[in-house]
Amino acid sequence: MQYIEVAGVRVSKIGLGCWQFGSREWGYGQAYADDEAIRITNKALDLGINLIDTAEIYGFGQSERIVGRAIASRRDDAFVATKIWPLMPIAPVVVDRGRRSARRLNLDTIDLYQVHQANPFVPDAPTMEGMRQLQRDGVIRHVGVSNYSLDRWKRAEEALGSPVVSNQIEYSLAQRRPDQDLVPFAATNDRLIIAYSPLAQGFLAAKYDVTNQPGGIRLTNPLFLDVNLSRGHDLLNTLRSVATTQGATPAQVALAWVVRRRNVVAIPGASSVDQLVRNADAAELDLTDDEDAQLTAASDRFRPLTGLAAAPAWFRSRLTPPARRP
Ligand SMILES: NC(=O)c1ccc[n+]([C@@H]2O[C@H](COP(=O)([O-])OP(=O)(O)OC[C@H]3O[C@@H](n4cnc5c(N)ncnc54)[C@H](OP(=O)(O)O)[C@@H]3O)[C@@H](O)[C@H]2O)c1
């Protein structure tokens, strides 16, 4: 496994995303929550993955409990990151919720405590006051944010009065907006980008098509609409072609592209131990500059239908079975 050290934090380039653990919306079932998730986490630690990412909202605490069970006997192998959902993020609430997360995780100290997203009505000062108290009391070690704009990240840091070490954001070959400011900022300011949905929820694994689409939460992801699966051909074929040259899979190439960016790590979720092992191996893939450029260019050409423009296609796809669609 490869590691990076940024802002005093040492994390594996490939981490493990745990939204899938105990969350109904992924539809992986009880056996996954009870057994496979524990096996996935243990195998991750065996392979040197230390960054384990969860949140209080995932499965309404279930994901944190599963992570807590999985790492109980090997706490020192893990760098545990969790998140507060910013409902009423004033200092006493933040302190209470941080302590509750630590209890569910069975930890004295959470390594990284992140604000899940910016609250549009409450500024960061009261939230960061709570974060400072949690740090003083030893309940959390580092503070991070998630889904923050660059401006709001800087303001959060001013409010904390010390580094907000990371911003967890959606970043992949299918979501390149962070290249405009967040990724360059982190690269030049000793800050960490934690890339979530680095496989675009499986889209970049190049295994889904019009006749084989995922269910659950991914029914709401416009990338899996027929129109976008078809617009994605060029990008997915580029991934397949680089994968063939590298003796890897498209998913591994997609992850390798993400973590090739300076100060960026990726936290793919996994539906099986086998996937986890392959994702960990992606840290060792050495893409050439030319392969990187080919992938970046294919990603630049990819223009998925999103937002309101995707609504008619979304309704059509939900109302018409695949066999009867044009
Ligand atoms: N901060 C935030 O707002 C936020 C938002 C979203 C996610 N996250 C975090 O980021 C993590 C990852 O994001 P995500 O789960 O949305 O998306 P992702 O990591 O891009 O996709 C995960 C899914 O891709 C498929 N997959 C994984 N490895 C694969 C492989 N090697 N080959 C083929 N398919 C593979 C699996 O689904 P199938 O096998 O079922 O296809 C898996 O559940 C989450 O667990 C969570 O911790 C944070």
Image: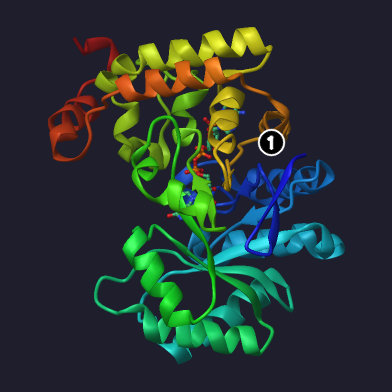
- Give how far across and how far down residue 167 sits, in percent: 48, 58
Residue type (three-letter) at the residue carrying disc 1: Leu
Q: Quadrant of residue 77?
A: bottom right
Lateral position of residue 249 relative to residue 129, left or right: right
> At 69% from the left edge and 36% from the top edge, which residue is drawn?
276
Lateral position of residue 310 relative to residue 162, left or right: left
- Give how far across and how far down residue 143 sits, in percent: 55, 71
Any part of residue 211 in sight: no
Which one is nearer the viewer's eye here, 74 or 66? 74
Element carrying mark 1: helix
Q: Is residue 124 above or below residue 246?
A: below
Considering the image in quadrants, where does the N terminus appear?
top right
* Residue assigned mark 1: 276
- Give how far across and how far down residue 152 sits, in percent: 34, 67
Q: Is residue 29 above or below residue 50?
A: above
> At 40% from the left edge and 24% from the top edge, which residue is drawn?
213
> At 41% from the left edge and 51% from the top edge, which residue is drawn?
182
Lateral position of residue 116 relative to residue 54, left or right: left
